[in-house]
Image (cartoon, rainbow, N blue to C red):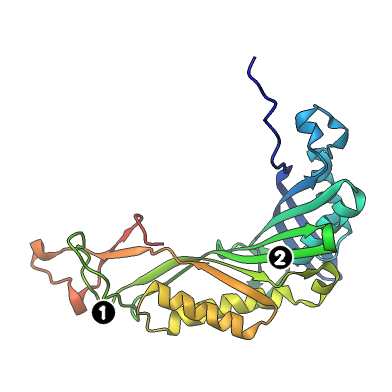
Amino acid sequence: MSNTSDVYLKAARYGKDLVRIMRVYREADKQTCTELTVRLLLEGAIETSYTKADNSVVVATDTCKNTINILAKRSSNVDNIEVFGQEITAHMLKQYTHISSAHVDIIKHKWSRMIVDGKPHPHSFVRDGEELHTAKITHLRAGNSVTITSGLKNLLVLKTTGSAFHGFYKDEYTTLVETWDRIFSTSVDATWTYTVRPAEKYSAVDYPAIYASVKQITMDTFAKDESASVQATLYLMQQQILAKYSDVAEVSYALPNKHYVGIDLSKFNIDNTGAKMEVYHPQADPSGK
């Protein structure tokens, strides 16, 4: 038998993933709905469940699922996912004293109120885009400290001019042709992390307003900037967010290129180049990132 005396458990984290909930709030003649996908992971004095087959320290993952569902029923903040996530982590640390940290990841799926007969409908909704609002909450028992990272994912944007790319480094491997005017399209993946602070200090942050503002800053900058490169444009977005919100400690963007390549029509004696380029082929990959 192999010698296992020098084998030890370095770290352990477990929980429940892909918990799907739809929460409906009914107020008089108006209703709202929120659809979420939630992951809850736990850390703490759970090592004996791995090393000694001791299940007495295990909060069952089914219990994690039930807890999310029950808190969704009791909470008035399910639509405010950063706050709802804190409610989940705070509950887990209060309920289970051997748990040292709780980690929640939430995806909020988009449902927008329908406009019917020129006005918002009281209880009908449409998915009018695939962008996702995300939140990651890490809550430590030590110091009762919370770290929150919000996100905007899958926001697909495109502009047909106002973007260039030239002056880049060239060597014997370079074939890319410089351009002073091109289609710029990307799927925005942005995250912003709030300043770490005690849990009770987070209640004053207006997360929905900051999310809406980050989305608007992203779109405004994308549309207005005479982009010299993806890098330069995303840095302008980051600067504006950090300047506007002192509660935000850092911002990250991934803007993978969605390439549109001019189609060669020269065999048909048709000029589709330069200023006359009007027909493009959407190229799925590869993409810069």
User: Under tag 2, what secondary structure?
Assistant: strand
Quadrant assignment for the C terminus: bottom left
Dot placed on the residue nearer the N-terminal end, 2 or 1: 2
Among the 4 quarters of the image, the one containing residue 65: top right
Comparing 90 with 35, the one in front is 90
User: Under tag 1, what secondary structure?
Assistant: loop
Q: Can see residue 79?
A: no
For badge 2, the amino acid type reads Ile
Residue at point 83%, 71% (across, down): 29
Q: Can see residue 39?
A: yes
Comparing 223 with 22, the one in front is 223
Can you name the residue that lies furthest to the top here?
1
Q: Distance between the residues labelled 2 and 1?
A: 40 Å
- Residue 41, above or below 128: above
Residue at point 71%, 36% (across, down): 9
Quadrant assignment for the N terminus: top right
Among the 4 quarters of the image, the one containing residue 245: bottom right
The residue singled out by tag 1 in the image is: 180
Q: In this view, does 23 lie to the left or right of 173?
A: right
Residue 210: % across, % down: 67, 77
Depth check, mark 2 against mark 1: the one in front is 2
The residue singled out by tag 2 in the image is: 148
What is the crowding at mark 2: few (fewer than 14 residues within 10 Å), some, or many (at least 20)? many
For badge 1, the amino acid type reads Trp
Residue at point 83%, 67% (across, down): 199
